[in-house]
Image (tube, grey):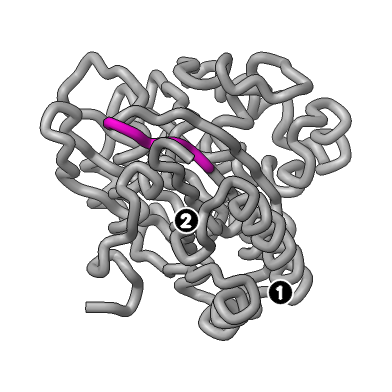
Amino acid sequence: MNGDIRASIDIGSNSVLLLIGDFTHGKLKEISKRSEITALGRDLDINKAFHQDSMDATYYALKNYAEECDSHGIPRERIIATATEAARVAKNAPDFFKKILDELSINVHIITSEAEAYYSTRGILFNTSFDNDLITLMDIGGASTELIRVNTKKMQIHESISLPIGAVRSSNWLQENLFVQNLQKVFLDFRIELDRFQSKEIFCVAGTMTSLGNMHLQRKDFIEDDVHGLMLMSEDIDILFKKYSSYTSEQFLNSFPFLQKRAGSIRGGLYLVYHMIHRLMVKELTISTYGLRYGTLIEGSVKRDFIYGKS
C-alpha cells in the first residue's frame, strides 16, 4: 500500500474516536473516522474508577477499531492510542489498559494534560486559518477542559491550563444538584489563571462544541464540513442555553438524532460552555473539527515526556 497510512485513537471521558489517514509529504488524506460514546468517565468522581459497563463499551469499540485497522494493513502495535483525564483519575485504569494490550494488542498511553494541550493544538493548527498570531483554544472533554494560548506563526504554546470539569462531570453535577457549587469552586481555584485567559475570541475543538455548532444550525444529521470553521457569537450560545438548558436526554435525542449517546451529556456540556464563555468574556467562538486525534496522527507517535507518570 502506497503512502504512510496511520491510525490514531483518542479515548476520552465520554467518547472513543478513531482516525485513519494517509499522511504523506505533510498532507493528510482522511480514510476513516469513527466515534463511539462509551462514557468512560461515568460516575468517576464518586467511584474513582471506571464503571464496568463503560469499560465493556470501550473494549468493544476498540475491538472494532482494531479490526478496521487490520483491514487497512495497519499493524496494531503501530496504532497511536491515547487516554486522557478519566484515565489519570481512575484507579482501575492500568488494569483495564493492560487487558486492552494483552487481548487487542493496542498499547494505550495515558497522557498528561500538557500532552492534551499539545496534540489538540497540533491538530487545530494543521487545518484552520487564523487572523491573529496569538489565539486561545478551548478543548472541552468529558472530564476536563483545556485552555491553551498559542502562537500560530511559531506553532508554540505560550501557556495552558487543565480545569477538572468537562461535559460528563457537568452532567453528573447537574443530576446531583451540585453544578453551581462545584463550578464556583473550580472558578475560584483557577481564578488567576482564568483571568489570564480572558479573550474576545476563542477557537473550540471536541465533541461538545461541534455538537452545539450543529444544533445551532438546527441539523438533525451531523455535517462536518458545515461545522468546521463555523463562527458563533456569545449571543448564539445564550440562545441555545435559554432554549435547551432544561431539556432531558430524550428531548435532545428527539430534536437532534445525530447526538445519539451524546444526548446524555450534552446538557452538561451546554451549561459548561455557557458559563465558561461568560467567565472568559468571550464574544466570538470558532469551531474546528480537528483536535487531539489529528495531532497524534500527524506527529506519528506519543512523546515519552507526555506519558502520564513517566519522567
Question: What amino acid type is highlighted by mark number 1?
Answer: His
User: Residue 210 — which label?
Assistant: none
Q: Answer whether residue 164 is magenta in the image.
A: no
Q: CA distance from mark 1 to mark 2?
A: 18 Å
Magenta-highlighted residues: 20-25
Q: Of residues 182 and 71, which is closer to you in this image?
A: 71
Q: Of residues 307 and 42, which is closer to you in this image?
A: 307
- First along the sequence among labels 1 and 2: 1
Let me know if residue 131 appears in the view.
yes
- Residue 48 position (above or below residue 199): below
Task: Decide if residue 131 is on the left or right side of residue 28.
Answer: left
Question: What amino acid type is highlighted by mark number 2?
Answer: Ser
Q: Of residues 103 and 137, which is closer to you in this image?
A: 103
Let me know if residue 49 appears in the view.
no
Task: Decide if residue 53 is on the left or right side of residue 108.
Answer: right
User: Residue 51 — which label?
Assistant: 1
| Residue wearing tag 2 | 144
Q: Secondary structure at mark 2?
A: loop
Could you say which quadrant of the image residue 132 lies in? Answer: top left
Residue drawn 23% across the image and 68% down it:
305
Which label sits in the foreground, 1 or 2? 1
Category of crowding for the residue at label 2, using alpha-carbon neighbours closer than 10 angstroms: few (below 14), some (14–19), many (at least 20): many
Q: Position of residue 39 (x, y in %)?
A: 68, 59
Q: Secondary structure at mark 1?
A: loop
